[in-house]
Amino acid sequence: MGFLVWLESTAYAEWILYGTHGWPIMLTAHAFGLAIAVGVVFVMAARLLGLFEQIPVVAVRDILNFAWVGIAINIVSGISLFMSQASYYSQSIPFLVKISAIILGIINLHYVQRVLKNNASVWDSQGVPSNGKTLAWSSVILWSIAVITGRLIAYL
């Protein structure tokens, strides 16, 4: 717990929590990163689940790299927000569930990219198999849990 208290006492953490601009800047960056990452993942999932069939799976595979931009933004802004109230967040059940879902979502995204790298062309011609749909649903579920529990942090 001493490390978390130290994090909260850094000038950077105090600027975020008590400064005029720190919290709004980081929260805005976090929202943009979330929109990018989750937006791209949901488009990919929708395509694999049979929506937007006019969009080739190969094209969806190629835009997945953009999701990593959103994740990078969220890592920086999320760590910054965490630092401002590290003691509170480290004991918050919604926060812990959110972080778990994000870690699993990132692992899932990496795996989806590997699968699509090898199979996107085939799936365009033969259709998305059940394992592709399972990957899509797992992405939707994990990132939905992350978003919902992220919002619950402020209320529970």
Image (cartoon, rainbow, N blue to C red):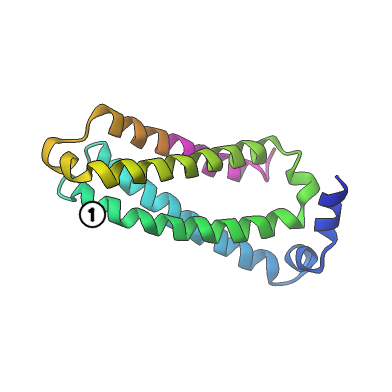
Apparent side of residue 69 relative to residue 85 in the rendered image (left or right): left
How far across and down, in percent of the image, does residue 137 sit? Answer: 37, 33
Apparent side of residue 133 relative to residue 83 in the rendered image (left or right): left
| Snapshot quadrant of residue 125 | top left
Seen at 72% across and 39% down, the residue is 92
How far across and down, in percent of the image, does residue 140 sit? Answer: 41, 38
> In the rendered picture of this protein, how many numbered marks are placed on residues?
1
Screen quadrant of the C terminus? top right
Apparent side of residue 54 relative to residue 110 in the rendered image (left or right): left
> In the displayed structure, would residue 134 be above or below residue 54?
above
Is 135 or 146 nearer to us in this picture? Answer: 135
Furthest residue in direction front, as rendered: 118
- Badge 1 marks a residue whose secondary structure is helix
Taking the magenta stretch, the answer to whether it contains residue 146 is yes
The kind of residue on which mark 1 rests is: Ala
Task: Mark 1: give few (<14), some (14-19) or many (20+) Cα within 10 Å.
Answer: few
| Snapshot quadrant of residue 96 | top right
Magenta stretch: dominant SS? Answer: helix
Is 66 or 33 nearer to us in this picture? Answer: 66
Seen at 32% across and 57% down, the residue is 63
How far across and down, in percent of the image, does residue 47 sit? Answer: 25, 43
Seen at 45% across and 56% down, the residue is 68
How far across and down, in percent of the image, does residue 95 sit? Answer: 66, 41
Seen at 74% across and 56% down, the residue is 83
What are the residue bounds of the magenta stretch? 140-155
Mark 1 lies on residue: 59
Furthest residue in direction bottom, as rendered: 20
Taking the magenta stretch, the answer to whether it contains residue 126 is no
